[in-house]
Image: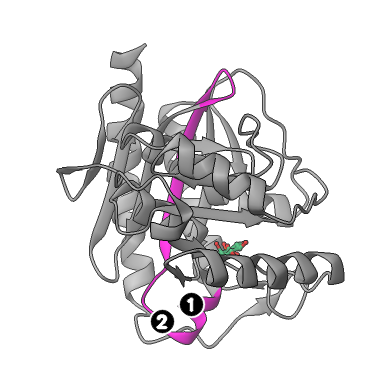
């Protein structure tokens, strides 16, 4: 299996690097966009073109593979996860950042086999950060191995946390309560505006935990394996096992920190992917 994963990964990495050029053409912002589910959920032509390039390239080499892509799902494709090798794609994670020219957007590509993330690529071509991970082989930033921090208490933890791209009232209440809780109990709060890059910060030890309600499978499939291969944990924010389609994620440097955070959070359960 590990040789197959290497083969799939190498092909994917070449396409991701080439697709990154579509993003760097717009480093100072992309003013043409459309709205999706609401006025803060945006899509640009670049999102669509990057996804087309990834699906086109990968399906040519691996015709039997399946895909779950953010923009294909927005266009009506079904979000179905089987045991088959499935590429889970966010062509531009941090689209709102991309529109504004805030330089934290990335391509997030996870490979899921038997419903488990086995490889991940998170590539921010704007500031040149390439995060990669393969099952059993560690996690890397630009080829250098990375590890989570050793922080195991909320009072010492820097937490990456997002409000997300929905204005649902119950969700916004949970966001506000959780923000207050982290400000009161934690070391500090950070928001990069990209779920995948927030998880990458945990993987490299820059942040100690990250949680979000309302993300989608494509936001977290690559981050899940990246954090685990860097020595961290990825769970459901209630404390149970991570479920890729649940639209809920909590990752942390240590199981102790993950559990303390899970017990302190106001929970929110969005509709599943
Ligand atoms: C969004 C970003 C954002 C997170 C949202 C995601 P998109 O992805 O990751 O940080 O808070 O939940 O939907 O729409 O930019 O691909």
Q: Which of the image's four quarters has the C terminus?
A: top right
Question: Magenta stretch?
Answer: 96-116
Q: Disc number at residue 230?
A: none
- Count residues near mark 2 (Cα–Cα under 10 Å), then give few for <14, some for 14-19, many for 20+: some
Which residue has dot 2 on it? 102
Q: Which of the image's four quarters has the N terminus?
A: top left
The chosen color scheme is one colour
Q: Residue drawn at (85%, 72%), measured in percent from left and top? A: 169
Q: Position of residue 108 (x, y in %)?
A: 45, 51
Which residue has dot 1 on it? 97
Q: Could you tell whether 172 is left or right of 183 in the image?
A: right
**Observer-nearest of 46 and 211:** 211
Q: Is mark 2 within 8 Å of ligand 1?
A: no
**CB within 8 Å, label 1 to label 2:** yes
Q: Is residue 154 visible?
A: yes
Q: Residue drawn at (61%, 33%), measured in percent from left and top? A: 242
Q: Is mark 1 within 8 Å of ligand 1?
A: yes
Q: Tell me the CA gap for discs 1 and 2.
A: 5 Å
Report the number of numbered marks.
Answer: 2
- Residue 194 in magenta? no
Task: Name the residue at the left extreme.
Answer: 144
Q: Residue drawn at (41%, 39%), measured in percent from left and top? A: 254
Q: Position of residue 170 (x, y in %)?
A: 85, 66
Quadrant housing residue 233: top left
Q: Secondary structure at mark 2?
A: loop
């Amino acid at each position: 299996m590990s040789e197959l994963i290497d083969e799939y990964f190498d092909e994917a990495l070449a396409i991701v690097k080439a697709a990154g050029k579509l993003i760097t053409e717009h480093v100072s912002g992309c003013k043409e966009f459309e709205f999706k589910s609401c006025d803060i959920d945006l899509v640009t032509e670049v999102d669509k073109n990057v996804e087309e390039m990834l699906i086109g390239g990968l399906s040519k080499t691996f015709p039997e593979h399946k895909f779950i892509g953010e923009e294909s799902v927005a266009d009506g494709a079904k979000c179905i996860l089987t045991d088959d090798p499935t590429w889970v794609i966010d062509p531009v994670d941090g689209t709102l950042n991309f529109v504004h020219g805030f330089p934290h957007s990335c391509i997030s590509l996870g490979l899921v086999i038997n419903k488990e993330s086995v490889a991940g690529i998170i590539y921010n071509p704007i500031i040149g950060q390439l995060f990669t991970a393969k099952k059993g082989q560690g996690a890397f930033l630009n080829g250098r191995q990375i590890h989570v921090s050793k922080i195991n208490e909320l009072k010492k933890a820097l937490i990456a946390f997002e409000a997300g791209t929905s204005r649902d009232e119950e969700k916004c209440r949970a966001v506000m309560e959780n923000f207050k809780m982290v400000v009161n109990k934690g070391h500090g709060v950070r928001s990069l505006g990209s779920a995948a890059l927030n998880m990458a910060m945990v993987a490299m030890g820059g942040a100690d935990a990250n949680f979000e309600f309302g993300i989608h499978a494509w936001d977290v499939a690559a981050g899940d394996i990246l954090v685990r291969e860097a020595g961290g944990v990825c769970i459901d924010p209630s404390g149970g096992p991570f479920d890729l389609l649940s639209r809920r994620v909590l990752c942390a440097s240590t199981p102790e920190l993950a559990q303390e955070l899970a017990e302190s959070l106001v929970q929110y359960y969005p509709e599943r992917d």
